[in-house]
Image (cartoon, rainbow, N blue to C red):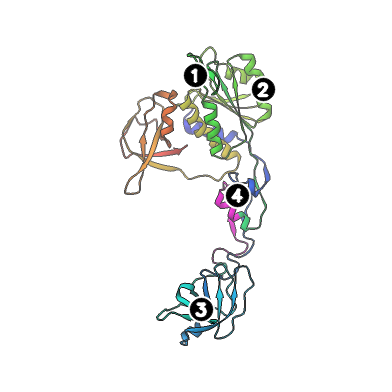
């Protein structure tokens, strides 16, 4: 049986690279960047005034002048005016520094009467105060964003400041989530006492969308071999990635591995030495599709989706690698099976600034209700069985 590290390695190695495509900036948030964004020009592109007030030559102040005839008013967006000797220009925040000026006196420190600006007694101004120097943020041509970054709302400001109306991004993978099981009933439909609500598919779809993978569709198939074969074949034709939930264990109605083999899906592995999620199955379709068959238990399905599916999609999207994240256990954990344990946790912090992972008890892998109180899970290696509070552990946020 594969270790968790071996399983992830095989999943990542099997993922084909997604092509790049152009996306309008208005639709690029959450996508993975495939180009370098460079500065169109210096930022700021001129010496930018940072306060409303007057602009003047500091040398005139140093000579003892405190009253200055107001030459004119310059607004933001207007070309820089040439300052005349011994005068001041009334200036607005965001305006270009007038030629010949090298000091801003804020409006709170002056009075203007009959066209003369008078600086309050005792005010000491410094050379180039309240001036945001040209190119002090970045120079023209410098790299602002690099390939692999997931575009955030803040990045949109950077992209538009570079003058771009569209950017190259990874094509969104077509993902099809298939829930299997006669007992499943979607929300909104009548349910019998012997049935259960279908939650895995909607939850995994939401999880994937949170990570930027929005081309997701969800289907429900009953546990009949012919139905499974027909509709999995349809989804294979339409998808880059198939995620099945349920039907991968050893029961009489667990047809998924057999049906996948009949459809030409090559098995890469079946079962991982972990809990929850031990029965997970992974394979490659006849046209290079990636097929994940996850256990039907909700905790198992969501952990496997986060642990394997999302990193696989990130690799296919050429997403930049993320540094591992760590936390310290906030409580003792005992786990005796010879398996890697993925322990759900709630994150807290202490006065020392440490991130602490508080273990959250779940009633086995079917207890999805307890997961709503968690922020992720920690990875406890199979070589240990007792993990005292304070143990540093790998943290995986949902």
Question: Residue 156 magenta-drawn?
Answer: yes
* Residue 147: assigned label: 4
- SS type, badge 2: helix
Label 3: which residue?
112
Is residue 275 visible from the viewing direction of this image?
Answer: no
Relative to residue 376, is residue 83 drawn left or right?
Answer: right
* Residue 233: assigned label: 2
- SS type, badge 3: strand
Q: Where is residue 377 in the image (x, y as percent from the top left)?
A: 42, 35
Contact between labelled residues 4 and 3, with CB atoms less than 8 Å apart: no
- Mark 3 or 1 closer to N-term? 3
Residue 62 or residue 319, whichever sits in front: 62
Contact between labelled residues 3 and 2, with CB atoms less than 8 Å apart: no
The magenta segment: 136-158
Relative to 180, residue 10 above or below: below
Circle 4 Cα neighbour tier, 10 Å, few/some/many (<14 / 14–19 / ≥20): some
Residue at mark 1 to residue at mark 4: CA–CA distance? 44 Å
- Mark 3 or 4 closer to N-term? 3
Contact between labelled residues 1 and 3, with CB atoms less than 8 Å apart: no
Identify which residue is drawn at 62% across, 46% down. 28
Circle 3 Cα neighbour tier, 10 Å, few/some/many (<14 / 14–19 / ≥20): some
Q: Where is residue 362 in the image (x, y as percent from the top left)?
A: 39, 27
Contact between labelled residues 1 and 2, with CB atoms less than 8 Å apart: no
Label 1: which residue?
196
């Amino acid at each position: 049986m594969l270790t968790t590290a071996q399983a992830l390695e095989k999943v990542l190695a099997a993922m084909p690279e997604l092509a790049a495509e152009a996306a309008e900036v208005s639709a690029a948030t959450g996508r993975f960047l495939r180009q370098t964004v460079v500065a169109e020009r210096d930022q700021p592109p001129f010496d930018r005034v940072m306060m409303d007030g007057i602009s003047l030559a500091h040398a005139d102040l140093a000579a003892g002048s405190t009253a200055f005839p107001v030459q004119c008013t310059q607004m933001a967006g207007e070309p820089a005016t040439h300052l005349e000797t011994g005068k001041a220009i009334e200036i607005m925040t965001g305006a270009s520094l007038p030629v010949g000026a090298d000091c801003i006196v804020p409006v709170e420190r002056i009075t203007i009467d009959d066209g003369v600006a008078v600086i309050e007694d005792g005010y000491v101004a410094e050379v180039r105060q309240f001036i945001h120097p040209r190119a002090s943020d970045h120079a023209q041509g410098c790299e602002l964003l690099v390939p692999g970054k997931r575009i955030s709302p803040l990045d949109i400001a950077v992209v538009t400041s570079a003058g771009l109306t569209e950017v190259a991004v990874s094509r969104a993978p077509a993902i099809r989530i298939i829930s299997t099981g006669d007992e499943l009933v979607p929300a909104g439909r009548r349910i019998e006492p012997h049935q259960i609500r279908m939650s895995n598919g909607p939850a995994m779809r939401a999880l994937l969308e949170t990570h930027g993978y929005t081309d997701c569709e969800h289907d429900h198939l009953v546990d009949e071999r012919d139905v499974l074969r027909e509709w999995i074949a349809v989804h294979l034709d339409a998808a880059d990635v198939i995620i099945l939930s349920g039907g991968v264990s050893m029961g009489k109605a667990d047809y998924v591995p057999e049906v996948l083999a009949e459809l030409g899906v090559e098995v890469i592995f079946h079962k991982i030495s972990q809990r929850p999620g031990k029965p997970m199955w992974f394979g490659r379709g006849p046209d290079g599709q990636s097929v994940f068959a996850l256990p039907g238990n909700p905790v198992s399905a969501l952990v496997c989706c986060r642990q394997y599916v999302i990193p696989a999609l990130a690799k296919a999207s050429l997403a930049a690698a993320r540094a591992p994240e760590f936390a310290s256990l906030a409580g003792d954990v005992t786990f005796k099976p010879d398996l890697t344990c993925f322990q759900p946790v709630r994150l807290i912090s202490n006065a020392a600034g440490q991130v602490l992972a508080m273990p959250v008890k779940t009633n086995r892998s079917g207890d999805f209700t307890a997961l709503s109180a968690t922020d992720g899970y920690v990875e406890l290696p199979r070589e240990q069985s007792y993990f005292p509070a304070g143990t540093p552990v790998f943290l995986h946020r949902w």
